[in-house]
Image (cartoon, grey):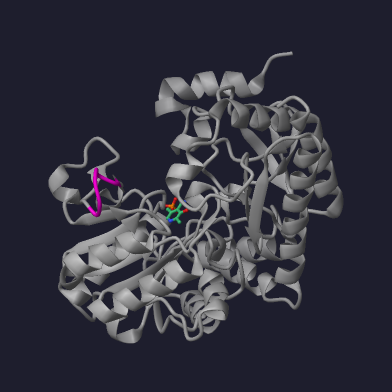
Amino acid sequence: MTDRNQELFDRAKALIPGGVNSPVRAFKAVGGTPRFVQRAQGAYFWDANGQKYIDYIGSWGPMILGHGHPAVLEAVQKAALEGFSFGAPTEREVELAEEIIKLVPSIDMVRLVSSGTEAGMSAIRLARGATGRKKIIKFEGCYHGHADALLVKAGSGLATFGAATSAGVPPEVVQHTLVLEYNNVEQIEAAFAEHGADVACLIIEPIAGNMNFVRASVPFMKRCRELCTEHGALFAFDEVMTGFRVALGCAQSVYAKLIPGFEPDMTIMGKVIGGGMPLAAFGAKRAVMEQLAPLGAVYQAGTLSGNPIATACGLATLKEIQKPGFFEALSATTRSLVDGLTAAAKAEGVPFCGDSQGGMFGVFLFDELPQNYAKVMTTENARFNKLFHGLLDRGVYIAPALYEAGFVSSAHTAQDIADTVAAAKEVFKTL
Ligand code: PMP
C-alpha cells in the first residue's frame, strides 16, 4: 500500500521548509512520517491513509469541544455567509469582549488579535509603554510566541540576561530580557533587587504547557505577585494555552482559590477563545489598556483582528464551555486518563507520573513531577520516542515532543480513555 502521508510529506518538503508550517509538526524530535490530517470529528482525526487516531492535541489546545461541534459549526457557517472580513468593527467583537471580561475579572478591557504570538508581543510593548521601562523577565521553558524579544533562553550564571534561541535575533534585541528558572524564588528576588526599577513586566505561563505540564508553586506565584506590586512592574499571565482550558476563569481563577485576592495585571489569551480559528487577545485594567492606539501612544493593529468568522467560532465555543458541569466533566475525563496511564505504567514497572487541570494534562517518565525546565529535559528521549510511536501505531496521537502538554476535549468518552490506557499498557511492556 502506498503511504499517502509519506507522499504528501515528500511533496511538502520540496515546497515548504521541513514540509510543515510550524516546526513541531515535522516529527523531528521523534522521527518518522508526520500524519497529514484529512478530516476530524469529535475526539478523532483521520490521516491521509484513512487511519483513525484518538486526538490528544486538539490543534494544540483550541479544540476543547472536539472537532466539528454542531453548535460551533452552525455559528461558523452562518458567519461565513455574512462575510469573511470587513476591516471595520462588528457586533460580535463587542460580544466576545463582553464574554471575556465577564469570565476574567482581572480584565477591564481587551484587544483582539489573530495569534498568541501577536498577543504576547503586543502585551509586552504595552507593558513597556505603560510603565516607561525597558526590561522584561521571563522563565526558562515558558513559550510566549516567537516575537524577537521573547525568543530567549537563560544565559550563564544567576539572573543574567538571556541569549537568543533563534538565529536572526541580534543580542541587542534581547538585551532587556532576563530569563530565570521557573519556581525559583531566590532568583526572582535577586533579579528584582538588582533590576526592579527597570522591569516593565514579568511574564509567566502559570501552568507551563510548553514544558509539558509544570505548575507554578503557590509560594513562587505569591512571591512573583508581591515583587511586581512592590516594584511597579506589571505581572502578565500568558494564558494562551491555559485560558478557558484549565478552568472557566482561566488559570488565574485556580490561583485565586489558593492565594486570596490574587490577580495578574495583564492576561494574554488565544487557542480556546478562537475555537480553532485564528483569534487571540490581550487584556488588562482600563488604565493600562487605554495606553493603546487609538487612545494612547502604544501602537498596535491588524487587518484581520477581530475577524467575523473567528469571533463567531470563539463565541460559540465560549457559550458551550459555560454550560453547567462542563468543566467538572472535562476535568474528570482528563484526570481519569492521567490516573489510568499512571496505574498502567506502574503495573509494568515503568517510572511514570502525571498531572492535569481542567482539560490540559502532562505525563512524565519520572517518579515525581518536575518543577522546572532543566528537570523536564532530563527525560530519556529514546524512551519517550518509543512511547510516542507505540501509541501512534495503536491509533493514539499525543504530542510528538516530550516538552508539550496534552489536551482532552469534551468529545472524549470513557471508552476513548479506556482504549488509550489499553494501548499504553501494551507499549509500557516494551519500555
Ligand atoms: N503562549 C503560549 C503559552 C503558547 O502555548 C503559545 C503557542 N503554543 C503561544 C503563546 C503562541 O501562540 P501562537 O502559536 O498562536 O502564536
Above or below residue 227? Residue 245 is: above
Quadrant (top left, top right, bottom left, bottom right) of the N terminus: top right
3 and 203: which one is in front? 203
**Which span is picked out in magenta?**
153-159
Above or below residue 112? Residue 149 is: above
Q: Is residue 326 left or right of residue 148?
A: right
Magenta stretch: includes residue 249: no
Residue 21 visible in image = no
277 and 324: which one is in front? 324
Q: Residue at x 46, y 70 (%)?
A: 219
Quadrant (top left, top right, bottom left, bottom right) of the C terminus: top right
182 and 315: which one is in front? 182
Residue 75 visible in image = yes
Q: Residue at x 39, y 60 (%)?
A: 304
Give the image location of residue 332, x and y in percent: 76, 63
Q: Is residue 241 left or right of residue 117?
A: right
Give the image location of residue 39, x and y in percent: 68, 41
Magenta stretch: includes residue 158: yes
Q: In the picture, residue 88 is in which quadrant? A: bottom left
Q: Residue at x 47, y 78 (%)?
A: 97
Give the image location of residue 16, x and y in percent: 42, 28
Q: Residue at x 23, y 77 (%)?
A: 231
Above or below residue 428? Residue 370 is: below
Q: Is residue 69 left or right of residue 373?
A: right
**Outermost residue, top direction?**
1
Give the image location of residue 175, x and y in percent: 16, 51
